[in-house]
Image (tube, helix red, strand yellow):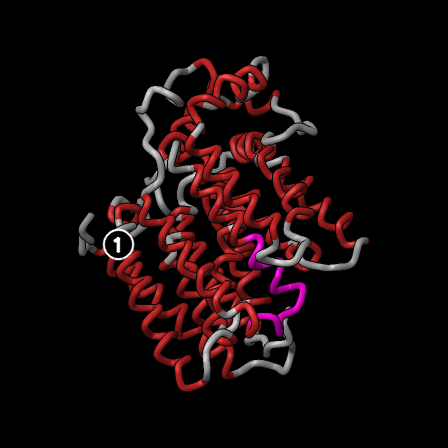
């Protein structure tokens, strides 16, 4: 799809440039603090807080894209009486319903919920990049060019859950056993926004092994096998889903009718390239120790989600929880995978290629609109 040059695209392009510059300025005016791999952290206000605010405002003021229309419509249908009867429950995915009820009881516009959701999503994703990406400004611009930012404008509940999970990244990536229980707190809070957040519990254990081990190969082979045999395996899955909140996937027919296409295979190739480089330069990435193994492994799982999504796009939603770590891996490849005389060429060459990739994702921005500007 071609880019449509309108005022929203102009604003969007300006935002990308401003946040990139702020990220560089944040590095310039850092205060000597160290990040997750020992790299100098950017200035918190200039390099992190301001980009989060800018990204959140633009995303939060939308009135279109993905399921945004449906959420706005359902909020308009929600009566004051129904909102008054909505109580806080310990239940997966109920938190957004409760927040909408609170907003309705207080006469607030749904835009408040959208801004809050955008803030949670951007704050969490950029926090991971702030703590671990090196170079930092490359991570910020890849946050946009890989499509993570624009895709976050669709799937409100899940991106809110993802933002919460990423705020617990310190415990998720920690090698201390006690930190697993601390991470569980973030999983529980995220679960109240979207029940799929619990997938991060098994992922927490799967990724804690040496990268490129036999288990990694088996995971990739198994993923490809599941995708190829999807039609044969789905009946068993649907039996499990019966009498659950996900029963509509089994009974609705849309899931297997071919009405919903799979993900674009181009995205698979884009995800494979950094992993191929990570394998080829694994000896250089070894300086990152266990943390490097963990991020490579979660990037592989991220690829697996997208491979399965070739059958149906819905599986790509699980990658909401893992895609930011693939961005971190790309920045590490630039910093640690190549010699100094190659680094600049790889940096700008990579930006150019991801800009071309984003061109094909432009439909998300093309349909953006707002009531406020």
To which residue does mark 1 refer? 8
Residue 240 at what x, y percent from top left? 58, 18
Q: Residue furthest right?
A: 178
Where residue 131 sits: x, y (%)? 59, 67
Magenta span covers which residues?
285-298
Above or below residue 127? Residue 227 is above
Residue in the picture at 45% in, 73% down? 334
Res 98 quadrant in image: top right
Tell me, yes or no, if residue 54 can be seen here.
Answer: no
Please name the residue shown 19% across and 54% down the image.
Answer: 6
Q: Is residue 349 visible?
A: yes
Q: Is residue 25 above or below residue 306?
A: below
Q: Is residue 191 left or right of residue 104?
A: right
Q: Nearer the viewer, residue 3 or 289?
A: 289
180 or 217, which lies in front? 217
Q: Is residue 289 magenta?
A: yes
């Amino acid at each position: 799809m071609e880019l449509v040059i309108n005022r929203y695209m102009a604003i969007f392009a300006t935002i990308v440039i401003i946040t990139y510059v702020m990220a560089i300025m944040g590095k310039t005016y850092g205060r000597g603090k160290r990040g997750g791999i020992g790299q100098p952290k950017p200035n918190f206000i200039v390099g992190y807080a301001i980009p989060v605010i800018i990204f959140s405002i633009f995303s939060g003021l939308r009135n279109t894209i993905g399921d945004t229309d449906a959420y706005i419509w359902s909020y308009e249908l929600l009566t004051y009486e129904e909102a008054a009867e909505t109580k806080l429950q310990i239940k997966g995915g109920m938190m957004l319903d409760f927040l909408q009820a609170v907003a309705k009881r207080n006469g607030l516009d749904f835009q408040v919920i959208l801004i809050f959701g955008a803030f949670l999503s951007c704050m969490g994703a950029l926090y991971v990049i702030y703590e671990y990406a090196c170079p930092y400004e490359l991570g910020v611009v890849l946050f946009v060019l890989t499509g993570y930012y624009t895709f976050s404008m669709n799937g409100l509940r899940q991106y809110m859950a993802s933002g919460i999970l990423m705020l617990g990244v310190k415990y998720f990536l920690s090698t201390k056993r006690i930190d697993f229980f601390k991470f569980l707190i973030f999983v529980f809070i995220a679960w109240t926004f979207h029940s799929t957040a619990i997938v991060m519990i098994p992922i927490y254990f799967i990724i804690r092994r040496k990268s490129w081990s036999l288990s990694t190969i088996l995971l990739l082979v198994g993923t490809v096998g599941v995708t190829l045999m999807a039609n044969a395996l789905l009946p068993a899955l649907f039996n499990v889903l019966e009498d659950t909140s996900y029963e509509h996937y089994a009974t609705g027919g849309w899931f297997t009718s071919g009405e919903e296409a799979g993900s674009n295979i181009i995205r698979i190739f884009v995800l494979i390239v950094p992993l191929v480089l990570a394998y080829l330069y694994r000896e250089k990435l070894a300086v990152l120790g266990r943390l490097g193994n963990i991020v490579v492994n979660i990037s592989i799982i991220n690829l697996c989600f997208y491979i399965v999504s070739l059958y149906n796009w819905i599986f790509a939603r699980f990658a909401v929880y893992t895609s930011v770590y693939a961005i971190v891996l790309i920045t590490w490849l630039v910093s640690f995978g190549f010699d100094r005389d190659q680094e600049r060429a790889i940096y700008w060459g990579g930006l150019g290629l991801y800009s071309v990739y984003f061109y094909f994702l432009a439909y998300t921005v093309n349909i953006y609109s707002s009531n406020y500007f």
